[in-house]
Image (spheres, rainbow, N blue to C red):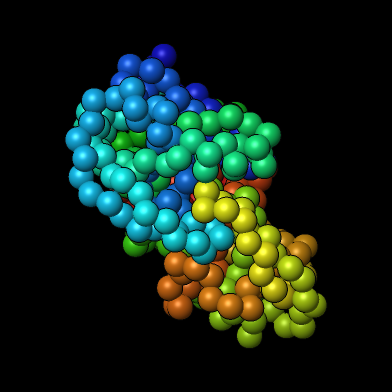
Amino acid sequence: MEKGKCTHRIVYNLFFVDAQIGGNSYAVLFDTGANISFIKASVLDKLDKTFVKHLAAGGSSGNRRDFAMWRIDCIEIAGYIVSKPTIGELPDSSIDFVAEQLNTQFDGILGWDVISKFCWAFDGQHLTVFDTKEEQTSRNLSSDSCPIIQARLQGSDCLLAFDSGHTESILSPAALALVGECSTTVDTAVGFDGAAENDAYLARNVRLQIGAASIDFDEIAISKDAIPGLPDKLFGLLGADLLQGKIWTLDCPAGCFMLY
């Protein structure tokens, strides 16, 4: 296959891409909200690896778990090779739990540690990987443990995290002052750490602007409590619904995110 052409499929707006690991192809979730990449235990058992450390981390439901971290030879995405990455080990049951909710099959998570090395461009049909797209000049993307996008929410400047592994966007309590009257609802978060239900507000007719693009949410949940893992300065977590029906470019080296 031509270098840069990334085999993928889309399920509920989530992107699953093919990764070459240990000479075999595996489907992994394109997850900008995961600061490290993970592979299921049954795949990791087949690989040459070196133990690095144990790490405690949490997922969408806010539960924390301990993971073993391993160094493997390489991960190859669309012909680009990331040498000697450190990846986490997830129990097969954790991957299979999420796969069952989505009615699909996959083997791991491609996290921000790998995604952030490249530019990713989706033209509505094809997903392409670059070192960077030099024509990108507008810097609206910064990086912490995940991408942070400069945007406008209801006309006000704000910062929001982008988690492409989360099916739906959710705003933080800081956004309440911008959206006006809300009703109440229950938001269900499903992740590799299990599922959790949380009381939330429901805002209607909310406009988000990223560069020249406008996204109108008929409804969007606002968490009553701090979103697990989200710094207080951020106004929410943009999920994979942001990408629905859109052409987009996530140019990590250039610090640019564009929707068309």
- Residue plotted at (60% across, 70% down): 171
Q: Point out residue 92 in the picture as x, y percentages from the top left corner.
A: 49, 36
User: Residue at the bottom extreme?
Assistant: 177
Q: How many marks?
A: 0
Q: Nearer the viewer, residue 173 or 3?
A: 173
Asked if residue 252 is positioned above or below residue 177 in the image, the reply reads above
Q: Could one spot residue 37 in this view of the protein?
A: yes
Q: Point out residue 173 in the picture as x, y percentages from the top left corner.
A: 59, 79
Looking at the rendered image, the quarter that the N terminus falls into is: top left
Q: Point out residue 177 in the picture as x, y percentages from the top left corner.
A: 63, 85
- Splitting the image into 4 quarters, where does residue 89 fall? top left
- Residue plotted at (77% across, 62% down): 218
Asked if residue 43 is positioned above or below residue 152 in the image, the reply reads above
Asked if residue 13 is positioned above or below residue 16 in the image, the reply reads below
Q: Nearer the viewer, residue 237 or 158?
A: 237
Q: Nearer the viewer, residue 103 or 115?
A: 103
- Residue plotted at (39% across, 58% down): 57
Asked if residue 35 is positioned above or below residue 28 in the image, the reply reads below
Q: Could one spot residue 163 in this view of the protein?
A: no
- Tell whether 27 sits left or right of 101: left
Q: Point out residue 163 in the picture as x, y percentages from the top left corner.
A: 51, 54
Q: Nearer the viewer, residue 203 or 192?
A: 192
- Tell whether 87 sits left or right of 199: left
- Splitting the image into 4 quarters, where does residue 51 fall? top left
- Residue plotted at (33% across, 16% down): 23
